[in-house]
Image (tube, helix red, strand yellow):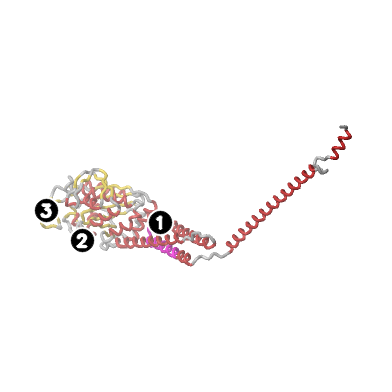
Amino acid sequence: MEYRDQLKYIKSHPAGGNGKRPDRKRKSGRKQEHTTDRRSGRYSERRRDRKQDRQEEKRRKRYRQEESRPSRVRPVNRLLWNVQLLASVFLFGSMAVLGILPMKYMAGLLLFLAALLLLVKGMQKKAARSRKRTSSGKGLSLAASVILILLGFYSLKVNEALDQIAVGEESGNYKEEHALSVTDRPFNVYISGIDVYGEITKESRSDVNLIATVNPQKHKILLTTTPRDYYVTIPGISGDQKDKLTHAGIYGIDASIATLENLYGIDIPFYVRVNFTSVEEIVDVLGGVDVESELAFTTGEEAGVVMDVKEGKNHFNGKEALAFVRERKALATGDNQRGKNQQALLSGLIRETMSPKILFHANSMINSVAGNADTNMSEKQMKALIRMQLGDLKGWEIESVAAAGDDTGKKRCYSYSGGPLYVTVPDEASVEAIKGKMRENL
């Protein structure tokens, strides 16, 4: 076919079969379709953005409404908060009346009570503003109120028990004694153990005769034991005649104090008198006491409990502790060693009562000695000592000494006309050595 014929054929037979250019139209259609899709995508995106903006605006508006809406605490919540407030005031007032907490602890207690009140108030306000179910602090407020009220009554009970103990009425010069500062200056305390059970009596033999020389600034205690059969004069009673130290208790606590003051040349402004019941109960309340024994021995029935005491550390309950300090027949040196055992028990009790755990036993311990112990130390002075100990929580250095003597012979005694009795004649060198130690601690 010639060139002209081919050209005519091509012109008369286009590729689309209809004389048009489909490729250009198809390409143009695809371009238009793509443009439409892009516009549709941008439109959808703008719709989503506008929808999100509207939702965010609604949330902001709702938040502003909740913030501006006054918080209306429910009456029950308001009542509980007021009860908690009264309970807080009651506890703080009770602790102020008790007066054994140092100022720093009282300030801490006040801050804690205020913080607890603010916490509950904040929870109540948050619950009142929120549409959701949130805690309003009712449970916390109720629990706190109950605990605070119980602690308040506990404090008042401890205060009442201290008042019952400070009822000594026999020693004179109360004003002078109560004016002494027991936290600034050293002082002596006579500790008398009476051989009776039940209610304490005013006239009874003193089987335990200890002097505690207390130096509060150095945190030192010197415990001096004097044998019950020490052969001494009783000032104002026996004249020039001598008698057993234990018989001085028959004439009252003042007679025993005067006898020991005369023996050691010291002033003893205070006394603490306990009986067997109080010793048992105090030890049991503390959950027992650890005592260091110098000797191994077995107690007899007359001591109250038959038991084996080992040399070194022993853990006693109330009855066992009492048997430990009552036993003397099983001891080679009799009353001299018994006095040392009494010192060992007292040292163990002091260590227990000076530890922080005493706070958990204070009320029970004080109640156990109420009616079974008394002292001429004022309630204010006892609280000052407790406050001082709680303030620094320092340990105490305890030293024990015992007066020695000859207990092999018999002598006539002022209080007994039936004949000579076994007595312990004082060792003057031992007495002088004790005097020197007392002066050092004072």
Secondary structure of the residue carrying tag 1 is loop
Q: Amino acid at mark 2?
A: Glu
Q: Rounded to the nearest whole Å, what is the CA distance between mark 1 and mark 2? A: 38 Å
Task: Verify whether residue 268 appears in magenta.
Answer: no
The residue that mark 2 highlights is 203
Residue type indicated by callout 1: Pro
Please give the residue where the numbered disc 1 appears in the rendered image.
Answer: 102
Up the image or down, 18 lies above or below 184; here it is above
- Please name the predominant secondary structure of the magenta segment in the image: helix
Q: Residues at badges 1 and 2 in contact (C-beta under 8 Å)?
A: no
Residue picked out by circle 3: 420
Which residue lies most toward the bottom here? 75
Where does residue 326 sit, x and y in percent of width and height? Answer: 20, 51
**Quarter of image, res 195:** bottom left
User: Which residues are drawn in magenta?
Assistant: 83-103
> Which one is nearer the viewer's eye here, 281 or 396?
281
